[in-house]
Amino acid sequence: MTNRIDTRLADLRKQGRAAFVTFLMAGDPDPATSLAIVEALPEAGADIIEIGMPFTDPMADGPAIQAAGLRALKGGMTLRKTLDLVRGFRAGDDHTPIVLMGYYNPIYIYGVETFLADAKAAGVDGLIIVDLPPEEDEELCLPAMAAGLNFIRLATPTTDDKRLPAVLANTSGFVYYVSITGITGAAAANAARVGEAVARIKRHTRLPVCVGFGIRTPDAARDIAGAADGAVVGTALVEALAKSLDAGSRATPATVKAVADLTASLAQGVRAAARAAG
Amino acid sequence: MTIQKPNSFRSGPDERGHFGMFGGRFVAETLMPLILDLEKAYAEAKADPAFQREMNGYLKDYVGRPSPLYFAQRLTEHLGGAKIYLKREELNHTGSHKVNNVLGQIMVARRMGKQRIIAETGAGQHGVATATLCARFGLDCVVYMGAVDVARQEPNVIRMEMLGAKVVPVQSGTRTLKDAMNEALRDWVTNVHDTFYCIGTVAGPHPYPMMVRDFQSIIGVETRAQMQEAEGRLPDSLIACIGGGSNAMGLFHPFLDDPSVEIFGVEAAGHGLDKLHAASLTGGRPGVLHGNRTYLLMDADGQIQDAHSISAGLDYPGIGPEHSWLHETGRVTYLSATDEEALSAFQLLSRLEGIIPALESAHAIARVIDLAPKRPKDHLMVVNLSGRGDKDVPQVGDILKSRKTT
Ligand SMILES: Cc1ncc(COP(=O)(O)O)c(C=O)c1O
């Protein structure tokens, strides 16, 4: 079964360039603006769209993404509405892959089987769940793969060679390499070290490796894109969004454009990369 | 749904850290290798007689164990029923049961060669115990504490700083214990190479709930022997307050397979169970947070709800996974006590026995006040006095003063 993620990454490989992956929080700062932003992303150069599922207790996220989640929740966002957002986007775009990223509890409470069916029907392609390591694969990973969704695994600098086979065993779509030990938005990724890590992971898998956490600028995006199959940017986009809001954290006429403009310049960085990863 | 009764209530968790459906290891991949290392290091320590010997030495001469099992004569006479014994954990060095667990974890951290210790704290008792043992062993110590708790438990903040710890007030979320734990986890993910996370209760990912329980079980082990000596038999009932559930689990665990012993846990009912409270078993349902599956207070979307309790140490929207299992299997009965009931019990124990309890422990006393009169005079009831109330004196003093003037 081919899916949008495999198709998109194979196309980009043929074009000889890395993927640009964006992350923004669903419903930030309100559902309508959030849909307008997501709709603007492909045109601005996003190849794959990650959408955060807001959660009250995001243990792996820094202040910017924590605040984005709280803005969304305050605006009434729920997991059901996150799926509505995906459905809304799919009405106008049937090609750009959508990956939902977040924490397990809202999915567990929604009901795993119902969630997987609803997510698939809404047009979701993959899931990244921060607090589900391979040790808990029976919870969601195996049911998600059975339902035809990609379950994308996080590999980190602490995932050593001994552990990599377990981490890569039940995974599909791509591998998300977390380039720093830390929370989102903290340190800056070092391209040389990232290159070594990507090579190490590729000795264990044929899946593409995308790299995220700590990429903030077009130059950094270019460097990382030169060392991997894709570069993920989240915090920088979320911060650009936050900066465009009014004093009451409401969207302004500048909000969608602020995110689209930064997306475009980061995408240029990615496209400028000399392709290294094979 | 009927829950299968196990042959023993003391055999959990399984090798994946499950107590029935509860527990597990729901953590970010960055932490997973370390958690597996910790599991191994703890298993080795547990099997090492030298580790046990060293720990017993510190428990005796540094912590001051065994803690007395004290017959509360005036409280017993006042209530007119069961014979009430207090397990005096408040007499431990640093003033609560928390030190039992911290000593054990710090010794494991030393075996693992970790030089930097982080902790979350609510009431500050776990933070104080951690700061104390870090001072004793020359380790760096950072304690995360919700900004709300920093304000209401100021004496403990001052103590931690005197002991050389860095106290970080947490401004995110509800600014209480749950957010302190989030922030500690964020620190841990960032500094995983040199940092040991000393969790203060029977929660978190496996092996923490088991390890903390083991270190706290000394409470119940001593109680068994002391009651045998005082009365020549087992107690008839046990009662303890529950935040995450470590003082309760420490008292309960050695008695779980003695069917004659009735066991009660007391959660914080805050303003009342129909208002803001912290009673996860009574008012919550199973979910996943902070590394394990357990009962949580949350909304229909799975978002964690604000807890409330007058006592910072109980102000947490979850509970250790083993308690969730003991609740579903029916082995332990979980009750609750409101802020007001705890305040009354706080004053009653102070006046009748000359013991000012921690507000946390006062929740257990509050349920003794209505359980004891309904039991016969030869019923032996043990209450875990998990901590002393020094830290609460300013807060309770302010509340009582404001009531006099209005
Ligand atoms: C004196 C005292 N008792 C009880 C608790 C609650 O924790 P646990 O339920 O883990 O015993 C605390 C926590 O801060 C405490 O300080």
Image: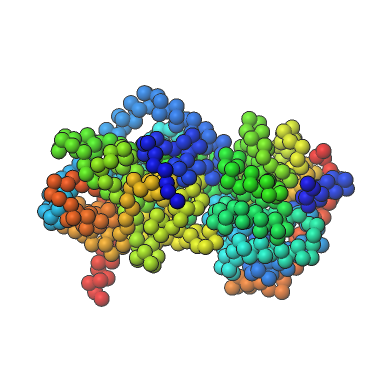
Compared to residue B389, the image places residue B396 above or below, namely: below
> x and y percent of residue A48 in the render?
76, 54
> x and y percent of residue B220 in the render?
28, 39
- Residue at the top extreme? B49
Compared to residue A79, the image places residue B107 above or below, namely: above
> x and y percent of residue B391 in the render?
30, 54
- Give residue B94's quadrant in the image: top left
- Residue at the front extreme? B2
Compared to residue B12, the image places residue A64 above or below, namely: below
Which quarter shows the C terminus of chain A? Answer: top right
- Give residue B65's quadrant in the image: top left
Q: How many marks?
A: 0
Is A68 in front, or is B139?
Answer: A68
Residue A63 visible from this viewpoint: no
Q: Could you tell me which residue is drawn at 27 percent across and 53 percent down?
A: B364
> x and y percent of residue B132 in the render?
36, 41
Residue B318 visible from this viewpoint: yes
Compared to residue B141, the image places residue A51 above or below, namely: below
- Judge left or right: residue B291 versus residue B254: right
Q: Could you tell me which residue is drawn at 15 percent across and 50 percent down?
A: B376
Is B367 in front, or is B309?
Answer: B367
- Judge left or right: residue B357 versus residue B320: left
- Judge left or right: residue A139 versus residue A190: left
Is B378 in front, or is A78?
Answer: B378
- Residue at the bottom extreme? B406
Q: Could you tell me which residue is drawn at 22 percent across and 55 percent down?
A: B371
- Tell me which colouring the rendered structure shows: rainbow
Q: Could you tell me which residue is drawn at 38 percent across and 57 percent down?
A: B282
